[in-house]
Amino acid sequence: MQTHINYIISEVAKCIKGKDEKIKLALCAFLADGHILIEDRPGVGKTSLAKVFSRVLGLQYSRVQFTSDLLPSDILGINYFDTKLSAFSFKPGPIFSQFLLADEINRATPKTQSALLEAMEEHQVTIDTKTMPLPSPFFVMATKNPFEEVGTFELPSSQLDRFAISFSLGYPGKEAEREILKQSTPLSLDTLKPTTEAVIKALKEEVAKVHISDALLDYLQEVLSFTRDSGLYLSGLSTRGAIALSKLSKSWAFIQGRDYVIPSDISFLLPFVTSHRLRSKEGSKSSTEISNEILSHLHPDS
């Protein structure tokens, strides 16, 4: 299994230079059945990561460019009257795919953003009282503009909480950027060999078998209690957030070649799980500062 993990990471890294940790985080979320929110400035490779990642995973890819006039039906699909059949037919929207890129998600209104809520949580959509399952696996990668940009809307907490992790890509390092500049043409996606559906299924099954001890579950609950009871944050971590952290820890351990979780798995992932969920009442703390604040009050057992 580790051979397949290394293959996926190395194939994506052929196009996404100098971002191995973020590639591993994306794979970690996917194997944990989570979704990803990427907040960053334009031009750092967010869309490229989505295209390459979906290609290497062998998933059916769909992209929605979120704009202020986008409607829920533009994402979900519509029922329309087919004159040839003299009956109503359903035209599925782009959400009926295995990999959905929600590009610049915070340029759409909260009403349109809410079209993703049922899909991200239950892997199904309900249209005109009819519930329809989505393809499996179903994975959402969303990009988000910085709030200082004009024409953006705040993401509601119900939407944010459905993303397992959030991170930014940042600028590439000097050596990685030099490699990018030296490329005469971008690497074609056709040169990347997709992973098979059977391999993806097997990887997810192996992640589910990774052991997390009762001591680490106690530690995880201590993290939850601190975020809720300390009075330092506007609101504490939700149960959904705790489940995400547990699943991600197992997935991260598996990517590292282990079949058991250790405390450092949880502490490493904590900033990415809390960055979009926790807001300090002081209003100026970064996700790293918040996670360090939490960890400094807790002492996990191995």
Image (tube, rainbow, N blue to C red):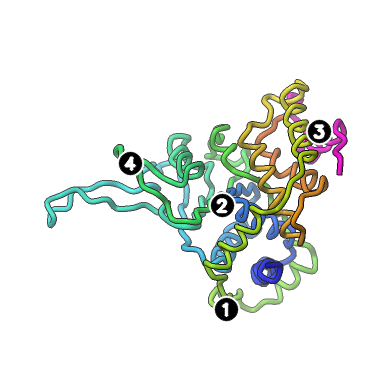
The vertical placement of 4 against 23, above or below, is below
Q: Amino acid at mark 1?
A: Thr
Q: Which residues are magenta?
A: 281-302
Looking at marks 2 and 1 on the same chain, the residue that comes earlier in the sequence is marked by 2
Looking at marks 2 and 4 on the same chain, the residue that comes earlier in the sequence is marked by 4
Q: Quadrant of the C terminus?
A: top right
Looking at marks 2 and 3 on the same chain, the residue that comes earlier in the sequence is marked by 2
Residue 56 at what x, y percent from top left? 58, 68
Q: Nearer the viewer, mark 4 or mark 1?
A: 4
Q: Nearer the viewer, mark 2 or mark 4?
A: 4
Q: Nearer the viewer, mark 2 or mark 3?
A: 3
Looking at marks 1 and 3 on the same chain, the residue that comes earlier in the sequence is marked by 1
Residue 141 image label: 2
The vertical placement of 62 against 235, above or below, is below
Magenta-span inclusion, residue 293: yes
Q: Residues within 10 Å of mark 2 (few under 14, many from 20)?
A: many
Q: Is residue 88 visible?
A: yes
Q: Residue at x 70, y 38 (%)?
A: 274
Secondary structure type for disc 4:
strand
Q: Quadrant of the N terminus?
A: bottom right
Q: Which residue is mark 4?
A: 127
Magenta-span inclusion, residue 146: no
Q: Residue at x 66, y 69 (%)?
A: 4
